Amino acid sequence: MSSTRGFRAANRRYKYLFWPLMAVYVAVIIGAKLFIDDEVAPAWLNVAGALAATLPVVGTLYAIRRQTDETDEYTRMNQLLALRDGGMVTASIAFLIGFLQIFNVVGAIDVFWFGALFFFAFGLASLKHCIGRTV
């Protein structure tokens, strides 16, 4: 349900959460790759680095969820359609790569890239309402 605080306030809260989380994410990724040697570091340090890199991503998903809770129905529908389309593209490519691996066309592909693919596809799908219909 749309909050009385308003649409602009919801977008501002989203941006105030999203951009710091992305800054933390980038800092953790760069810091972990620079300061943790994968081959000699203890397993607990690698796990800690992985968890530290995952938490901002989870926070970003929470920010998306919170924004859909706090905005009007039209904005919520656009957001959920973009999530749907991003998920559809990601699942389709995951199945394609899976079948290509079964038939020995491609080698192993890290699962990590599907998360990045989802956010990329979600971003492209979000642009659809900016350049698509105006009514």
Image (tube, rainbow, N blue to C red):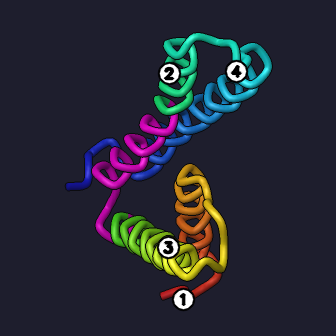
- Cα distance, mark 1 to mark 4? 52 Å
Residue 27 drawn at (x, y percent): 70, 24
Which amino acid lies under the numbered mark 2 shown in the image of this protein? Answer: Val
Q: Are marks 4 and 2 in contact (CB under 8 Å)?
A: no
Q: Quadrant of residue 5?
A: top left
Instruction: Give the residue number, with chain letter if any, for mark 4.
Output: 39
Q: Nearer the viewer, mark 2 or mark 1?
A: 2
The spot of residue 60 in percent (x, y) is: 48, 41
Give the residue displayed 44% in from the left and 72% down from the top. 91
Which one is in front, 81 or 31? 31
CA gap, disc 2 to disc 1? 46 Å
Q: Which residue is mark 1?
A: 133
- Give the residue type that dot 3 points to: Gly
Q: CA distance from mark 3 to mark 1?
A: 35 Å
Can residue 132 be seen in this snapshot?
yes
Mark 2 and mark 3 in contact? Answer it, CB < 8 Å: no
Residue nearest the viewer, comparing 24 with 40: 40
Q: Quadrant of residue 127?
A: bottom right
Q: Secondary structure at mark 4?
A: loop
User: Disc 2 or 3, which lies upstream in sequence?
Assistant: 2
Query: Disc number at residue 28?
Result: none
What residue would you read off at disc 3?
Answer: 98
User: Which residue corresponds to the image point at 44% horizontal and 35% vertical from the top-left?
Assistant: 59
Name the residue at 49% across, 33% down.
54
Point out the frontmost of discs 1 and 4: 4
Q: The magenta stretch spans which residues? A: 56-75
Membership of 128 in magenta stretch = no
